[in-house]
Image (tube, rainbow, N blue to C red):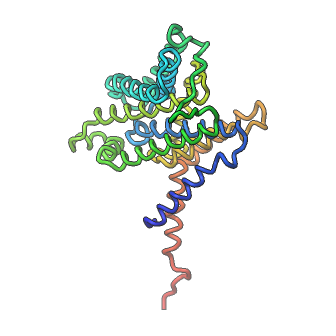
Amino acid sequence: MSRQARWLSIGVGLLFMLSIPLWVTSSFYLRLVNLSGITIIAVVGLNFLTGETGQISLGHAGLMGIGAYTAAILETAHHWEFWSGTLAAGVITTAIAIIIGYPTLRLKGHYLAIATLGLGQILWLIFSNWRSATNGFDGIGQIPEPHIFGFSIANDFAFYYLITVFVAAFVYLAIRIKASSFGLAMIAVRDNEMAAEAMGISATTHKVLAFSLSGLYAGVAGSLYAHLFTYISPDAFTLDLSILFFAMLILGGLGSILGSMIAAVFLTLLPEWLRFLDQYYMVLYGAIIILVIVYMPQGIMGVLKNWRRWKLFRATQPSEPLHGG
C-alpha cells in the first residue's frame, strides 16, 4: 500500500469514528460502543504480553480492576480529579504488574496460565473482602464524571469522544512500540527464547516490561470503565472477563493490533445481537467462539493475510494455460 493510500485509509477511518455518535442515536448502543473502546485498550495492552511475547495471562481482568478501584477510591474518598486519578490508576497498576511479573513470568506455558489465573482470583477476593476500601460486594458508586477545560463529560455522546482520544493515543503508542527495537526483541523472545538469550536479549526483562505495559493499559481501561458506569463492584472483574479478553486476542490474531481492535468490538457487540435468542444466546455465543478458534486458528488477520496472498498468487498466474509447441 502506497503512503497516499495509507493516509487516505487513515483519514477515512478517523472520519468514520468521529461520525459514529451522529448515527448511533440509541444511548444503549452508544454505551456499548463506548464499552468497546475501553475493551480495545485492555486487549491491545494484553497483546503486548500474549501476542508479542507469547505469555498466557488469565488475570488481566484483575489488573483492570486495580485501575478501576484506584481511580474510584481516589476520586470519591479523596476528591482527586479525573486526570490525576486515571494517571494514578495507570501508574499503580504498572507497578503492581512489575512486582508480580518478576516471580510469575519465570514460569512458562500452562504453569504461567495457572499462576495468572490464581492472581486474578486473589485480586477478586481482595475487591470482595477489603470492605474498608472497596465496600465489598456493595461496590463504589457516585464516581464523578470527568471534567475537561471546565466541561463535564456527563453523557455517552461526550464520553465517546473522550474514549476515542484514549484509544487513538494508546493504539498509536502500541504501534510505535511494536515497530521499535524493544518490540522486535519481544517478538524474538516469543519465537525462540533460547535464541533470543544467545543474542543478548534478556527474556525475563522483556517479559516483565511487556507485563508492565499490559498493566498500564489495563489500569487506564479500568479507570475509564469506572467513569463510564459511575459504579464498580467485584462482579465486573471476574475470571470470565479475563477469558473473554484472551478469546478476543485469539479471534483477532495473536500479535495483531488491528485484529485485537476488530475482535474487541465484535465480541463486545455480539451478545447484544444474539439477545433475541433469549436464554439460548450464550450457547450460540460460545459455539461461535469455539468454531472461530478451531477453524480460524490464525484469527481474523491471519485469514485476511492468507486471502491477500491468494489474490496476489492468482494475479501472477497466466490467464490461459500454456501449451507446449
Residue 159 shown left or right of residue 46 in the figure: right
Q: Is 126 above or below relative to 313? A: above
Front residue of 203/20: it is 20
**Res 46 → quadrant:** top left
Can residue 244 be seen? yes
Q: Is 215 above or below relative to 269? A: above
Q: Position of residue 248 (x, y in %)?
A: 55, 40
Residue 216 shown left or right of residue 15 in the figure: left
In the image, what residue occupies the spot 62% across and 51% down? Answer: 19
Q: Is 286 above or below relative to 313? A: above
Q: Farthest bottom residue?
A: 325
Residue 108 shown left or right of residue 256 in the figure: left
In the image, what residue occupies the spot 51% across and 86% down? Answer: 323
Q: Position of residue 94 (x, y in %)?
A: 38, 28
Front residue of 211/216: it is 216
Q: Position of residue 247 (x, y in %)?
A: 55, 37
In the image, what residue occupies the spot 32% across and 27% down? Answer: 106
Q: Position of residue 231 (x, y in %)?
A: 60, 22
**Res 13 → quadrant:** bottom right
Can residue 117 be seen? no
